[in-house]
Image: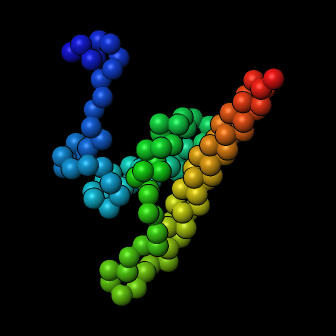
Amino acid sequence: MRELKNDSLQTPNIDLDTGKPTQRDEYPLADATYRTLLDQLAADGFEGMDAPLRDDLLHFYGGFGFPTNKYGWLDHCVVERWRQTFREVNQVRADALLESLRESVDKDQAAQGSKP
């Protein structure tokens, strides 16, 4: 309760339905929820995405690659859905890279400004 009162409560990143760590392909409902969140953020140009949310999405979609071929063929809809998700995840990755570059430039400028 103290942690909650002090705004320092940290909860584990687990799937509350399964009790397992949240990761892609672990639970279909979580996959669909992340996909919906990614779609909504993309539709808004990622305007409402802060750094912790971005980092969580990148962690969830870490190692994201082409869907596995479980049945000997891939449905056209599955491939198109994968392409859309791939584009959106890469937009999030690009945002993270740009932020990192901005921080690096800011540090360099601050260091140069403090030199006599």
Tell me if 1 is positioned left or right of 35 in this view: left
Residue 80 screen position, x and y as percent: 53, 70
Vertical side of 110 occupied by 98: above or below: below
In which quadrant is the C terminus drawn?
top right
In which quadrant is the N terminus drawn?
top left
Q: Residue at x 46, y 48 (%)?
A: 57
Residue 78 in view here:
no
Total numbered labels: 0
Vertical side of 10 occupied by 63: above or below: below
Q: Residue at x 26, y 49 (%)?
A: 21
Name the colour scheme.
rainbow
Q: Residue at x 36, y 87 (%)?
A: 72
Residue 67 in view here:
yes
Residue 88 screen position, x and y as percent: 57, 56
Q: Nearer the viewer, residue 93 or 72?
A: 93
Q: Residue at x 40, y 52 (%)?
A: 60
Q: Nearer the viewer, residue 75 or 35?
A: 35
Quadrant hosting residue 78: bottom left
Quadrant hosting residue 44: top right
Residue 53 screen position, x and y as percent: 47, 39
Tell me if 39 is positioned left or right of 15 in this view: right
Q: Nearer the viewer, residue 46 or 81?
A: 46
Residue 97 screen position, x and y as percent: 62, 49
Residue farthest front in this picture: 116
Vertical side of 96 occupied by 9: above or below: above
Vertical side of 71 occupied by 16: above or below: above
Tell me if 97 is positioned left or right of 24 in this view: right
